Image (cartoon, grey):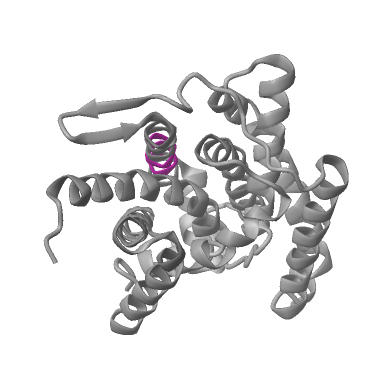
Amino acid sequence: MDIPLDLLVNGIVSGLLLGGFYAAVTVGVSISFGMVDIVNIAHPAFIILGSYIVYILGVEFGIDPILAGIAMLPVFYALGAAIYQIYYVSFEKRGRESLRGLAFFFGLLFITEVSLVLVFGVDYRMVPAAYVGPTIRLGFVDLPLRLLVPCVVALTAIGLLHLFLSRSFIGRAILAVSQDEFALRLMGASPVATKRVAFAISLATAALAGACLIIIQPVEPSTGRDYIGRVFAICVMGGMGSFGGMVIAAMLLGIVESLTATFYGPSWAPAVAFTFLLLTLAVRPAGLFGR
């Protein structure tokens, strides 16, 4: 079968842009699950919550979606700190964080989704923005701004977060907390406080990811379910806690999904993408950048 060059190139470019968004969705899980061993399966639900808040700020007050997502970072950070404190007192402090902790986050997912349904219903919502419709054309390559803007914002935010984790004391403490809590105490840092900050940061990223999501596609309360398996798979595939590996894994997944949707139809994209993820993990169980 002859593959048109323009379709192939556009499929790859769209996949790279989509992968940038997938990285934004996954970065919070990469911190909570990959760095501090907290399996927050409710993370996609908080991304949808962020999308709806961005929608309200955009429709009611005319605030740009990206600016709205940035403005919500402190609010989601405080929410993450509060959730971790409840999780710590109820489960982690008692050594019951495995199965019961997972049930706790499943409950949060259910409560968040049902609350959104009660408030907003099940209709799809889209946010107004100047860059949702236009496309930049470079030769035969199309760059839809609704994909380009979230990709650039996501990669910038991940880069800044990487600098924070690698250069600051609290950032290095977050990287060390899951490896050796005793050594962390010797450094004068509290493991509990460090995990609280890490989890709060992970949840704060959901605000920006939610802004990116509602730019790319309309959302309704159950949209987050589409990303639960995907974000954990990307996190593991990239290597636990590795931002570089996570971004590369997200890009690869985006390319596979985009090319599959382009040449075989959108209905095949999820199946082929997850087959690709499983094959990669079968060959490299520790992930692309795992040890």
Based on the displayed image, in which of its 4 quarters is residue 120 positioned? Answer: top right
Residue 280 in the figure: left or right of residue 205? left
Question: Residue at 41% of width from left, 68% of height from top?
Answer: 268
Residue 86 in the figure: left or right of residue 65? right
Q: Is residue 54 above or below residue 187?
A: above
Question: Residue at 53% of width from left, 34% of height from top?
Answer: 215
Magenta-drawn segment? 156-163
Q: Is-magenta flag for residue 257?
A: no
Residue 122 in the figure: left or right of residue 161? right
Instruction: Kindly tell me whether residue 223 is visible in this rendering.
Output: yes
Residue toward you, 61 or 179: 61
Q: Position of residue 241 (x, y in %)?
A: 43, 61
Q: Position of residue 112 (x, y in %)?
A: 79, 52
Question: Residue at 56% of width from left, 37% of height from top?
Answer: 208
Q: Quadrant of the C terminus?
A: bottom left
Q: Position of residue 231 (x, y in %)?
A: 51, 61
